Image (cartoon, rainbow, N blue to C red):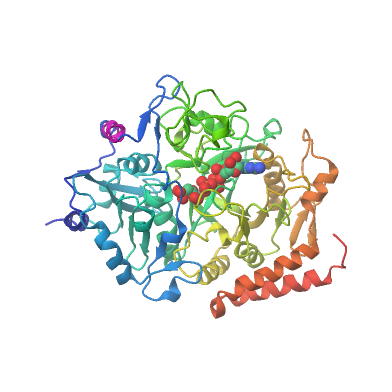
Amino acid sequence: MSTPLEQWVDSVARLTRPAKIMWCSGSEEEAARIQEQMIREGHTVPLNDKTYPNCHLHRSDPSDVARTEKVTFICTRDRENAGPTNNWMAPADAKNTLTPLFDGSMKGRTMYVIPYIMGPSASPQSRIGVELTDSAYVVANMRIMSRMGNVALARLGNSDDFVPGLHSLGDLSPDRRFIAHFPEEKLIWSIGSGYGGNALLGKKCFALRIASWMAHEQGWMAEHMLILGLEAPSGKVTYMAAAFPSACGKTNLAMMVSALENEGYRVWTIGDDISWMQIGPDGYLHAINPEAGFFGVAPGTNEKTNPNVMAALRKNTIFTNTALTTRNEPWWEGMDHNPPADMLDWQGRPWSSSSGPAAQANSRYTVPAVQTPSISPRWEDPGGVPISAFILGGRRARLAPLVYEATSWQHGVYIAATMASETTAATTGAVGVTRRDPMAMLPFCGYNMADYFGHWLEMGRNIPHPPKIFHVNWFRKGDDGKFLWPGYGENVRVLKWMLERIEGHAAATETPIGIVPTPDALTLDGLSVTRKTMEELLSVDPAAWTKEHADVGTFFQGFGERLPAELRDEHRRLGERLRRVPTGSK
Ligand code: GTP
Ligand code: SPV
Ligand code: MN
């Protein structure tokens, strides 16, 4: 008798017709063979084995360098269950469209079977997935990003309780690229891309789109959030989870080297992208990081902005679409001031300063989480860590103050549901366009977003000690177009204010949009930010917010009757508060 997993593998092999099937064990010897295979295929080179031991540079197809939201589908029987913010196809139509593309797509190639656990191996909150792929690069990445191989098979046994994900490179043509999710069956089909969130199916496809559906059904939360611990001088660690859209600073905040380390404040990393949370026996929301590695943005990463990750990625790391120096080392914009001479750019072509960026704007590193010096001793705690704060944020050149706090859970859900951010290179399409990105989940929510808002409201009613909700904006710019706030390690000053709010003793003033620190409430010792800049960073402009309020109204209309009444109420109340502010005041 074959197991449910074996039956599925057989049926996929009959469709895709690989020359060979390889079950991944997760062993070191297997990892070495996969690396050799990648090098033979010609898109991967080993890096300097003295300065970057066991590291590789992979160049993806130039048309395949970011997630492609346009061809990402939620395939529910009823279109309404996918909602107005997702692309939808009927499950049968999706299968009819994709089956011919998978037909024979692995001919002459190896099909890898990757059983994996999302979450610490010993955690009851963890879940199992299995990815079938014809990409050695995907295997090498999944090995870093998840607990992969025999450890997952042992946990699965003969059970059918796993999320199947079928992936094939196909012909890599953007016209024949589809990332299809079948949440009712908990199934994923992805073809035509070898890149990041399109191809590493444990990450956005399972841990967010399918998991958000499961979480809604089962009463937990799957969120696009980093998880960090803020240690205070007393030694007490307070855990926080933060939702920022793609390429808006999650990895950097999670691994920050605190500017207040001398005062005893430091940051511990639990996760940098995804958080699975359920209510613990102590009445707090408990978070686990479902991933085992970091798939981080390279450009802008350096010894000053993120020394922890710079230390981490000196071994066992895969670089994707960075430049290559003559010393066989990776390079990207913002790594240091002076680009080394005679580099190859991300496509392997000789680079000169007139030929544009050397590294692709969404170039990335894949690094095991344990290699990060700031990794929390509790990062694999089977029970997760108790969360005291949710932090929401995005890129807003104008409008949003450095930090503000919601007056209640319901008000916090309104702030989360109306978040907006300027788009980045993490997804294909225009960069720098402001769009609504509720909970930083716009591209990742596996069901109707109005129902998802309802789920947040419901969770708030059920959590005895819900996290306090804050909103931050590290990206506000002055009239000169420069960032007003120094960001990175200095962001700990804002976290410290949050901690004091949680403990109930930080100075703050109420504004129409929420609770803002007084300019003196933030610890600014050793920082060259003037009082005037600080006031600008914390200012709330009623006229600009009145425009924002109208824009949110239009956004909400898209959800029709399904939008929870609580959010309509919060929206009306914000309008009233804004109207009460005397015009011309700040
Ligand atoms: P995904 O992996 O796509 O989900 O991205 P992320 O949210 O983890 O973003 P990440 O931390 O990788 O940062 C993305 C970009 O924003 C990088 O180029 C960073 O250098 C930059 N960045 C991060 N934090 C700050 C900050 O506090 N201030 C400024 N100005 N830039 C920042
Ligand atoms: C993001 O875009 O939010 C990422 C990178 O974390 S990817 O894995 O491509 O989704
Ligand atoms: Mn992300």
Rendered image quadrant of residue 208 = bottom left
Q: Residue at x 37, y 52 (%)?
A: 201
Q: Which residues are magenta?
A: 31-41
Q: In the rendering, at what x and y percent does residue 565 appear?
A: 61, 77
Rendered image quadrant of residue 32 = top left
Relative side of 451 to 55, left or right: right
Q: In the rendering, at what x and y percent does residue 403 appear?
A: 71, 52
Relative side of 13 to 78, left or right: left
Up-down: is 130 above or below 231? below
33 drawn magenta: yes
Q: Residue at x 32, y 67 (%)?
A: 94
Q: In the rendering, at what x and y percent does residue 33 appear?
A: 26, 32
Q: Residue at x 29, y 62 (%)?
A: 98
Up-down: is 355 above or below 12? above
Query: Taking the image as drawn, is residue 138 in sight?
Result: yes
236 drawn magenta: no
Q: In the rendering, at what x and y percent does residue 117 appear?
A: 35, 48
Q: Quadrant of ligand 1?
A: top right
For the view shown, which residue lies furthest in the bottom direction? 561
